[in-house]
Image: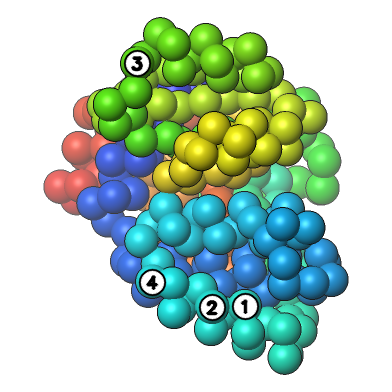
Amino acid sequence: MSGHNKWSTIKRKKGAADAKRSKIFARIIKEIAIAIREGGNTDPETNPRLRLAIVNAKGVNMPKDNIERAISKAEKDPSSFEAVTFEGYLPHGIAVVIECLTDNNNRTVSFIRSIFNKREGTLGTSGSLRFLFERKGVFTIPKKERDIDEFSLELIDAGADDVEIQDDVFIVTTALEKFGPMQKKLEEMKVEAENAELKFIPNELKQLDTALGAKILRIIDEFEEFDDVQAVYHNLDVTDEMVAAVDVS
């Protein structure tokens, strides 16, 4: 897990520095809309996906009024968003899984395919690369004044596969089937996560030199800048040198 967590740390720092708040909010509003449509109600107590979307909205300091407006709008005007996932290879054998929420599938497919084609990648069929990744729950929890050993043991007893400290947060990883129970456990403990989501975690990381790795990160940035894209997962072993090379380019 150390390779994944190293990647998460770098991505978290880079995301905090680069992210545009309006784009983050727009993606969360989409998630709220689809959660209400699929869950059939606006009660986070009985709609787990909505509850998760609200947790993540609070984690990025989305104002309460914005959250309530998004819920109200979705209730009155059910969204036509659908979840779509793309998989493929970027240059040098780097595998990617791209999760999207879209109200125009043709637009999304066209954009994703164009990036693969322009950047000499290969768009695969759905499910073709899943063997390279494992679906896991990942919670980011502020460290605050918590006792590290005691808190970690309590989470492991609740079903966490791994608990690590990164800067000022705990990164808690669970098996897919333990994601829901861990959410409930945190609620019982009155612990508010900064972020909670299901991610595709690479089984193995692929190493490239700095220049080639930076090239891959630029392609990933192209995907992430598209409004329909919710998340991009990959198996590149990201280094600080790669991130620095992207930032100065």
Q: Quadrant of residue 221?
A: bottom left
Q: Measure the C-alpha gap from mark 1 to mark 4.
A: 13 Å
Q: Amino acid at mark 3?
A: Asp
Quadrant housing residue 18: bottom left
Tag of residue 147: 3
Residue 44's x, y, as percent? 68, 61
The label on residue 71 is 1
Secondary structure at badge 3 equals: loop
Q: Residues within 10 Å of mark 1 (few under 14, many from 20)?
A: many
Alpha carbons under labels 3 and 4: distance apart:
30 Å
171 in relation to 51, above or below: above
Is 11 situated above or below 37?
above
Does 16 appear above or below 102? above
Q: At label 1, which amino acid type do we have?
A: Ile
Q: Amino acid at mark 2?
A: Glu
Task: Give the foreground label among 3 and 4.
Answer: 3
Ranked by sequence position, the earlier of labels 2 and 4 is: 4
Secondary-structure class at tag 1: helix
Numbered disc in front, either 3 or 2: 3
Cα separation between marks 1 and 2: 5 Å
Q: Residue at x 72, y 67 (%)?
A: 43
Please give the residue where the numbered disc 4 appears in the rendered image: 63
Residue at which label 2 appears: 68
Q: Position of residue 175 (x, y in %)?
A: 71, 24
- Front-lying residue, 141 or 225: 141
What's the residue at 84%, 71% (across, down)?
Answer: 40
Report if the CB atoms under discs 1 and 2 are less than 8 Å apart.
yes
Q: Label 4 is placed on what type of residue?
A: Pro
**Mark sitting on residue 167:** none
